[in-house]
Image (cartoon, coloured by chain):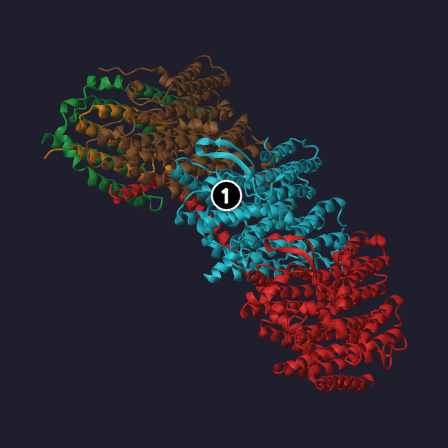
Chain colours: A red, B brown, C orange, D green, E cyan
Amino acid sequence: MVESAQDLIWLVIGLPLAGAILLHFAGRRIGDPRAGYLATAALGAAFVLAAVASVPFFTGDGQSRLVPLGEWLPVLGVRFEINWDPLAALMTLVVTGVGTLIHLYAIGYMHGDERFPRFFCYLNLFAASMLTLVLAANFVMLFAGWELVGLCSYLLISFWFTKPSAAAAGKKAFVVNRIGDLGFMVALMLVFFSFHTFDFASVFEQAGSLLNEGTATAIGLLMLVGAAGKSAQIPLYVWLPDAMEGPTPVSALIHAATMVTAGVYLVARSGAIFQLSPWAMGVVAVIGAATALWAATIALAQTDIKRVLAYSTISQLGYMFLAVGAAGYTAGIFHLMTHAFFKALLFLGAGSVIHGMTGEQDMRRMGGLRKHMPVTFLTMAIGTLAIAGMPPLAGFWSKDEILAVVFERGGLFVALWAVGLVTAFLTAFYMTRQFVLVFLGRPRWEETGHHPHESPRVMTVPLMVLAALAIFGGLVIRLGLESFLEPSFELVDQAHAPSDPLVLLLLAGLSVGAGLLGIGTAAFVYRKAPSEWEGFERGFGPAWGWWRDGYRVDDIYGAVVVAPGLKAAEAAAFKVDLPVIDGAVNSVGGAAREFGFSFRNLQTGFVRNYGAYFVAGLGALLIWLAVRGG
Amino acid sequence: MTFPQIDWLAIGPELVLAVGAAAVLLLDVTLRPAFPRLGGLAAMAMAAGIGLAIWQWMAWVPAAGQPLPFGGMVVADRLASSGRLLVLVVAALGLATGWSLLAAQGRRAAEALALMLLGTAGFSLMVSTPHLVMMFLGLEIGSLSLYLLAGFSRRERRSDEAAIKYFLLGGLASAVFIYGVSLLFAGTGHLDLGGQGHLLEGTIITTPAVIILGLALVIVGLSFKVSAAPFHSWAPDVYQGAPAGFTGFLAASAKVGGFLALVRILVTAFGPMSADWEPIIAVVATLSMVIGSLGAIVQDDVRRLLAYSGVAHAGFILTGVMAGGQEAASTVWFYLAVYVVQVLGAFAVVAAVSGPESAGSPLSAYRGLSRRSPYLAATFSVLLLGMAGLPLTSGFVAKFGVFQAAWTAGFGWLVVVAVLTSVIALYLYLRVIVAMYMGEAEEDLPLPGTGSDWVPGVAVFATLLFGLLPGPLLDFASHASPL
Amino acid sequence: MIVTAGWYLTLAAVLFLIGMVGILIRRNALIMFMCIELMLNAVNLTFVAAGRALGTLEGQVAVFFVLVVAAAEVVVGLAIIVSVFRQRHTASVDDLAELRG
Amino acid sequence: MVELALFVISAAVAVSGAIAVIRARNPVYAAMGLLATLFALAVIYVVHLAHLVAAVQVIVYAGAVMTLFLFVIMLIGVDKREDTTEQLSFQRPVAIGLVGLVLLGGGFLWFSGAWDWLPLVTEAADPQATNGTVQAVAEPLFTSWVLAFEATGLLLTIAAAGAIALASSRQRVPRSAGSGGA
Amino acid sequence: MPLLTALVVIPVVAAVIVLLLPRRRPELPLPIGVGLSVLPLALAGYLFAAFQGGTAEFQFVTRAAWYAPWGISWYLGVDGISLPMVVLTALLVPLALAASGMILRRTREFVAAILLLEAGLIGAFLALDLFMFFVFFEAILIPMYFIIGLWGGERRIYAAVKFFLYTAFGSALLLAGIIAMAVIHSRETGALSFAFEDLAALDLGHTTELWLFAAFALAFAIKVPLFPLHTWLPDAHVEAPTGGSVLLAGVLLKLGTYGLIRFNLGLFPQASVDAVPVLTVLAVIGIVYGAVVAIVQPDLKKLVAYSSVSHLGFIVLGTFALTSAGLQGGVIQNVNHGITTGALFLLVGMIYDRRHTKQIADFGGLAKVMPVYAGFFLFTAFASMGLPALNGFVGEFLVLVGSYPAVPVGAIVGAVGVVLAAIYLLWAYERVFTGEPTLPENKALIDLRPREVAVLAPLAVLMLLLGLYPRILLDKIEPSTEAVLDHIETVTGYVAPEPSRPEHLLAEVSG
């Protein structure tokens, strides 16, 4: 049964894809909510299939398998081929598992939307694309999935396209991702140039022998550019906050749990290349740490419930980059998984709040929702604690693992570890701030006429399942992950946490302490009346404003990149193309006409002039004949 | 005293034309028949001439060394017979084009017909004689008839102007030509070209300066007749001022006569001196192509435009002359055959649009022609595209032949100039097409019409036929070699 | 001093050029026409002189034909000039410049 | 010496006549100048033993052609003195310059190549061979040149027909001020 | 009648039939034209099916002397490079006709012009005699000129004349080059010949070869159009009617790239190698420049036109990388661009038919009123910007990966064009389709009619098919492109640093 499940592994992609196709052509007829159930069922079935197919990896005797599906680009040796190994299996389980839950949730969340079936069509398509990405056995197929998830991200962010901000956000996400993809694409050129193949197996096996350090650095950094785009790292993270324009399940699924982790997956998958270049690894780690801190500070000052989560996601992704940059691939993947659980939970919870508040997203107009939305309150509390790294919740295990691994690397990495620690504090602070502002304190929404209510079962059930995962998932995975992933990382030298239990304990204590400090501070400040915590925020002076505005990076990009770019394009089109290039062409025609007119002027109508031309021609001819020497 | 060999068939076409002319004139004063009969008579004479020319072509197997008929005043080679054929076809189409114009001349129709017939005979002699004085006579017979036809209109003041300009400048050019002949005579002691290099055989001079001078003058004189730049300035004015019904005949016959005579002179007599005349022809060809193309693109009158285009075509044909030898004769003949048919067809359209006796055909009158007369617009377009040398038309084949011959002879640069100027020239043809198809007529005046609407149709048929399947005509042309 | 053919040919050339100048500088059509006659006469002189130098009669025979052509040209040319004059009352070619451009 | 004298005199007359043609204000004077040139050339033809040509020159040219010219001059107004000031800008200097160009080019060619040829031929020529008596000229004219001779018929027919056509064209044109036909 | 001859002749016959339809039945020509144009499509389909992959030989060769003394013959044949173009042409013509319902004046002439254009295009792709090629190459200008000039927009005359003259200028030098080659052939062998294989076998000498290469390349570069010779294209596209634009962008431009591959590479191997720097640099400039200029175009058609400049730059880049992948990418990108840009022009035409404007600023929020239309547009836009699984990716990816070894900087800069494509297409999409429809004219728009969907659907299917299963073409293309490269290698000894031929790379590294 397991064997045949692995043979049928293409169905993991095929099921959601079939769902998408079906919903595309017959969605309207299937209708709301059946379309949602259909999509959920498709992805759920894929989850079951994947689970069955990955049983051997759990038991520890699983062999990685390549399942060829067909030729694609013969001249490059590119096939459609599935690489079924533990890492892929793990990612598949996360994508299908969390995805199924979010699908289910979305049935409730999107209920009543006139394009309900289309939404699920896109969700299914996204799942298929994401699974293509993680199941790819070569870089081109991975790149295809990579681009396709970008497409789905675009479609889903701008799902409510009549809202100009949503449409713009979708475009921004795609374009910024494309900029990253440029790096990825050049990396692929280099890969092919160096290896004459795109297949993971041969590339990674030969990496040590065929790549020199320079090329490895180049490939690594270029891949990092791509990964930074997809995983919203500095400097390409700017699309992710805007992506919150999309429906909340989209934010949860794509912009928290799955798609954005593709960059981490890519770096982890390509560890065999990265490890050839300490330099590239270092850059990955530094970028990760910087992003973690940078985004965390911005998250501090956000007032939009989803934007807090968005910056939090960026920050957590930074953690993962820090981990894989420090060669802690397993730690990175671990955090990827736990983050998927609790961040999906948080997003869905936020969505539940938004749903309950009929669209309100400003935390300053919330407060005291605990009574009205008990399930959401509880699950969000778990999520908040998890992300704050409180033991024994999932976040604690993975974050602790990352910090430990980084610390163990020593040297520069200790500084990065410190950054991580600060970030842990900040994370705890802003998450608690959010939680308190939303659920505790006095309601600040009564004058707006909202009537908060708990969400329907179809939404709360996924919340509860995710909460359970956020509680127990960490420890469970912690126990088996390393050996589970062993076959996938056998080509790379992993960094490990310190073996000294005392050091481990100390590190854990520090990170938990940082978390507790953050929780405590935030709880203390934001339990008070709005005027007081507003005063607290003002106390930071201009810094708070910078954080609130995300360091005005969008404005800076607008002024430094977009505006000059547009100006340059306009100059090219209207100052170069029309007047210069086309002008040159037309002036050739104009010159011909000028000549023509001058001949016309010679044609005076006076016959004696004509005679003169005749004689002139004759004379010139004779002179020429004489000169050339009779 | 040696009597020359009298071979009436050798001058059969001219004889028929002369008899026809005489008959027309005599009948006119005696029986005074209605025009159609006189015209029919002229047409029959031309038809008979065509038949005789074809017969000559078939009968004369080119062979050097045979005594020439009439003491060397005519030559029985296939350049002559195919040249005659061309002259006669031009005449027949010219007659058809001018039919309504002739019919409107009343009593003067007979004179006009006689002028056409005799002029045709003149050009016919011109292309079939190896004797320079005879050539001059033929040239003058033809030219005088053209001067008169240019000024034939009784309504148009500008017709007179055209005639006197043509006459004075033509007289100058004729004088230059015959002066050149006299210098060649002084230099060589011969007046007949004979066969290859014959003219130069008897020469006793060591340096051919006088010959070069004479040759240059002869070339200049003939360049004038074919309206090659810089000796072209008469052409726009004359084409514009002459009665529309005669302009095609006027434009085409002078070109046929001039070019075939030029080819005969250069190829047979002066073949050995090609290094001397090639530069002259090359310069004249370049100037013609450039001036013709550039001058044409700013014209507002279709006839002036066609005149300049004719200048450019003269340049293209001269490019073919550069090939030298047999190749020059056949490519030039083919080009002429293709071009004159198109020119006559085009002027038939002009006559139909502007009125057969009109002087001037402003481009504005062609706006929206596609609606007023789809047939004329379509045929004119095809003919213009043919003149432009676009593929699928005979014009392309002709240009291609000329270019290829010139390149083979080593004048690649001239071919490059030619292809580039032909792009410039393309614009002028497009302008007319734009006016006909894309312009709106200011007022929907009925067309004057000529009743010769079939002429453009025939020209289009020939243009497309020989554009798609030029083989037979090319084969025919390949025989058009001088003795 | 022997008068060689070259002298005559030079004289002919001078006459020819004078005729050419005349065509360019005179605007009376009749006089321009006379200049053409002048040029044809120069041609005749060349034929005769060259014929003598070459010892052939061909030159003289050729002169006949040039003469005939000149005569025919005169008839045609004068007819055209008269025709123009009748309509426009001028024999000046400078007044005939409607066709231009 | 005789030939030299005759040459000098007749050349002087011919050139003077030619200059008169292009300089005279009155067309009649111009015609007289042309007549003088024609006679001077006739003299030279006689010197060349081209008797028939000389005779025809006098009879046809000086007689018939010039009469025709004078006739037309009378017709279109003998009293009209041409204003010889040049109206076309630069026409006159340009004309002279251009003809000078022709002269220069032609002369250069002429002297560069042919100068050594002319005396040579003069020595070799047999005067009797070119004695252009009527009989001598008539023989080639009616044998080897017979076709050209016939062709002149076409030429004259054209001239006649053309003149008639042009003359008749104005008969019904009311604006025509002239009377009668040529 | 031989198959290939029939492919050329049938459209001509169809055009004549259409022209003979009664003038008083203006509704007839279009459906009849569409019906008749299915015949060549069927033949092309048969040709595609019957074409033997795995060989570089010309197939279905038919040859008959046209004028023997000049060595010209009616000489047609098809190989892997021309086959896709023929099929593409035959496919796009019925669609272009079917989308021309708004042509109300002179319908007969329009349909006939399109059919004649088809004959010319197919002929040019099939011709193996350079004279014949030139005839078709040039003859195409005439129907296209009328299509733009008679049924075009405001400045149609300017655009038509510019198009005609500009391209004729290029082909003039091509003609000179062809004649020169034939003459050289006659000097070497004593007889003129215009046959492709005869001329390819000539030993030209380096200087001559460079000159001839330049003449050919200029003609084709104008047609492509390669920067900076592109300015006729936006004008022609903006003014041309929909059907004309479709064929212009879809097929006509490909004559340039096809010519570069077939003739420049085939006839002048050494010069091609020498010209790699020049042409790839121009191609890369064109990629970026065309895309940058496209961003700020206010007119949808102009935007698509400039995007063509960019996309065709990829083809030239791939071609002159002289690697297997690059060349295959170039050939298949010919087809891809024909399909996607053809579809884009169809789409712009459909909205133009409704609103009589193509200005982006006149639209907004169309996705709400025309969801199906918006869907097709977005789909095509993504195909055009090279989204994997759609056709554009296959070509561009092959080109980029293939050209990297030969011209690394070119490939990298060229990849920027992919980013820019996303910008101009998505920004245009945003402005046209998203937001609420504000203008009342836009609110009343009707979504696509079934007939229009039927026109677009085949193209959309092909985008997907070629994106996922490009082998359907690549397998037929590969032997021919390999043969071209082998020819270059045998003649010049030049081998691009070709990753798919690792032995060369290794040899280079070790040597």
Place of residue D1 in the rendered image (x, y in percent of width and height, measured from the top left): 9, 32
Place of residue D26 in the rendered image (x, y in percent of width and height, measured from the top left): 29, 35
Tell me the SS state at disc 1. helix
Could you say which quadrant of the image residue C64 lies in?
top left
Residue at x-position 56% and y-position 30%: B448
Could you say which quadrant of the image residue B331 lies in?
top left
In the displayed structure, would residue B43 be above or below residue D18?
above
Place of residue E380 in the rendered image (x, y in percent of width and height, measured from the top left): 68, 53
> B16 or A524, which lies in front?
A524
Q: Is residue B367 visible?
A: no
Q: Amino acid at mark 1?
A: Tyr
Q: Residue pushed farthest top?
A: B31
What chain letter is assigned to the residue under label 1?
B
B320 with respect to D3 (left or right): right
B365 with respect to D135 (left or right): right
Q: Which residue is mark 1?
A: B427
> A240 or E240, which lies in front?
A240
B387 with respect to E472 (left or right): left
Q: Is residue E31 visible?
A: yes
> B145 or A392, which lies in front?
A392
Place of residue E76 in the rendered image (x, y in percent of width and height, measured from the top left): 54, 37
Please tell me how crowded label 1 is: few (under 14), some (14-19), or many (20+) other residues with Cα within 10 Å.
many
Question: Which quadrant holds the C terminus of chain E?
Answer: bottom left
Question: Which quadrant holds the N terminus of chain E?
Answer: top right
Circle count: 1
E198 with respect to A255 (left or right): left
